[in-house]
Image (cartoon, helix red, strand yellow):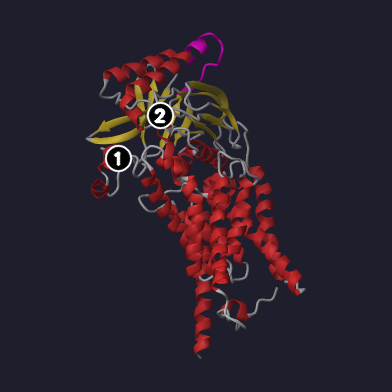
Amino acid sequence: MTVTATSVDEPEQLEPQAAPASSGARWVRRLVPAAAATLSGVLLYVSFPPRTLWWLALPAFAVLGWALRDRTWKAGLGLGYLFGLGFLLPLLVWTGVEVGPGPWLALAVVEAVFVALVGAGIAMVSRLPAWPLWAATLWIAGEAARARAPFGGFPWGKIAFGQADGVFLPLAAAGGTPVLGFAVVLCGFGLYEIVRLVVDGRRTGVVRRGAAAVALLSVAVPVVGALAARSLVSDKAEDGTATVAVIQGNVPRSGLEFNAQRRAVLDYHARETERLAAKIKAGKVARPDFVLWPENSSDIDPFTNPDARAVIDSAAKAVGVPISVGGVVERGGKLYNEQILWDPAKGALDTYDKRQVQPFGEYLPLRSLLGAINKNWTSMVRQDFSRGTEPGVFTMAGTKVGLATCYEAAFDWAVRDNITHGAQIISVPSNNATFDRSEMTYQQLAMSRVRAVEHSRTVTVPVTSGVSAVIMPDGTITQKTGMFVADSLVQKVPLRSSQTPATRLGILPEMVLVLVAAAGLGWSVAAVVRGRRNDVF
């Protein structure tokens, strides 16, 4: 395709109208793109777990591309916001399970602003040659911003996290979640561009070969890349194997109130561990090399409470192997969400303090302002948790176990640095009881599946109330529990020490995509400025 200077560098000229359009026609022209943007956002939500309709992300972005192409940046801002609301409102509804609709709506409304800005950017670059490329990089730039701000970021809803069952998943090993997400979005925009060019070609009788080639490559390259990346995915045991046990003790009842019954939660997990010990003694299951308890399995500080210490010690002695215990501890007047390595003979040997604590869940930003609005919100987080500073890698029976506690699994860096510090498997201890039977636990489980492929590691997910699981390095779930049941999982898993390209490259692929997005925006702005200057002179 030969692109003329007019198509790129000059503002679009308005054609004279024979007669003014009716008000009804104007409303249709406004409402159809708005409805399309909103519904395509809903379609993107439907592509996410617990459903396995990952492929719906492609038509979702194809429709978004139709809605945004050749729009002004202001129109793109509004359409992008509608797309963001259509996606995020249903995706994040679980955040209001216990605290009501206020925080849920506020979170979705704020997060959709990032999508709105991306929409404005996509509208601006949509007149450039190879626009699907620029548009897809802009989407990843928006995800990068959402993962960092405000209050440390909120990466929930990354496109990559909806692709655990998809053909593009191996790309996580090539370049992490940014490359995986970029491939999906590029393919979606490319599909729309193919359809658009076919329709234009039939109408005009002219086939623009250059544009057609770019559109076809936008679809073909992500698919071929995903097929090629399958060679990076392996379940081979490089460092032998380990037999791991995952404990799900359950909670007395779902909801925030269970924290007031923390002794019962501790007892439940100790009891399930003792049941496992009985099964081992009876020869019903293999003896594990170590045991993993979930986050908040002991909200009673075992360092200051002899009773809690005795319960944990008794469970460890019964099973006869080290346990990673999820505790809440106070040290130096500060509160920590902590994993504790508990040896059956020596007691507590090591600790890991959660580093990415959850805003409005584990600490309260703007506490005084929120208290003035609703005192109930501040009472739910009476004391802020402090952040840890060191990565968590426990040596358990000779195995290096990397820890990413619950919310941390959503953050690229929080998982990756465990691998760079030698982790042979990953554990994601979590507590989802607050969110009842919502989709939250399945969304989080999908994140862990993506992380398994991204770093080629077995991932275990011990959860207080479910769904607990064992995930192979290829992202396959080999065992899982139900929700709100007491259960244990025992499995021999491969230990691996090699690093995928995604692990080695770290943040580099994301930064490259952000720079490409910035270049596309710069080109678009420069084209508009030159066009206006030409009009003046």
Indicate yes or no whether the magenta region holds residue 283.
yes
Residue marked by disc 1: 386
- Tag shown at residue 402: none
Quarter of the image where one finds residue 212: bottom right
Q: Residue flagged by tag 2: what amino acid is it? A: Ser
Whether residue 84 is visible to the viewer of this picture, yes or no, is yes
Q: Position of residue 415 (x, y in %)?
A: 47, 41
Query: Front-most of 56 and 312?
Result: 56
Indicate yes or no whether the magenta region holds residue 163.
no
Q: CA distance from mark 2 to mark 1?
A: 25 Å
Residue drawn at the location 47% of the way across and 33% of the way down:
437
Q: Is residue 161 left or right of residue 379?
A: right
Of the image marks 2 and 1, the number of the one nearer the N terminus: 2
- Magenta stretch in the rendered image: 276-291
Residue drawn at the location 52% of the way across and 58% of the way down:
139
Residue drawn at the location 40% of the way across and 19% of the way down:
268
Q: Is label 1 in a helix, a strand or a loop? A: loop
Whether residue 153 is visible to the viewer of this picture, yes or no, is no
Q: Which residue, as the protein is rendered here, is positioned at the far top?
A: 282
Residue marked by disc 2: 254
Q: Is residue 128 left or right of residue 404?
A: right
